[in-house]
Amino acid sequence: MRVCKAMTPPHLCSWTGQTYQSVECDSGECKSTESEERDCSDQQLCHESEMKDLMRKLDSKVGKLFKALPDKALSIILLPGQTRTSEHFPGLCLIGVKNGSSM
């Protein structure tokens, strides 16, 4: 049997990106002028890149932790959501079971 490696779901980066983007651009910092819209989109691209790097590091750490678990161990990772006056971002729950120790 093989060990299930930690995997970041493909929608996780977009979920965290939406949460981060909402904080930055909906807070009134981004105006409706063209140059500021470009600045905001450049910032968003930069933040998305940073977020992908953070997700990669998180995935690596979770993978190492998962490998250290005993066989047939259940791992649950909870990422809490956020509720604001205008928006609600639900949390995420990632669940995995280690199937075996042979690779």
Image: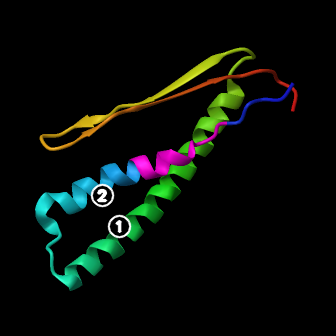
Q: Quadrant of residue 5?
A: top right
Circle 1 sits in a helix, a strand or a loop, which is it? helix
Q: Position of residue 58 (x, y in %)?
A: 53, 44
Compared with 69, 21 (above or below) is below
Q: Quadrant of the C terminus?
A: top right
Circle 2 sits in a helix, a strand or a loop, which is it? helix
| Residue occupied by mark 1 | 44
Number of the label disc, if any, that sits on residue 21: 2
Q: Position of residue 77 (x, y in %)?
A: 50, 28
Residue at figure coordinates x 62%, y 17% from the top left: 74
52 displayed left or right of 73:
left
29 displayed left or right of 95:
left
Under mark 1, the amino acid is Gln
Q: Residues within 10 Å of mark 1 (few under 14, many from 20)?
A: some
Color encoding of the figure: rainbow
Q: Residues within 10 Å of mark 2 (few under 14, many from 20)?
A: many
69 displayed left or right of 21:
right
Q: Quadrant of the N terminus?
A: top right
Under mark 2, the amino acid is Gln
Q: Quadrant of residue 21?
A: bottom left
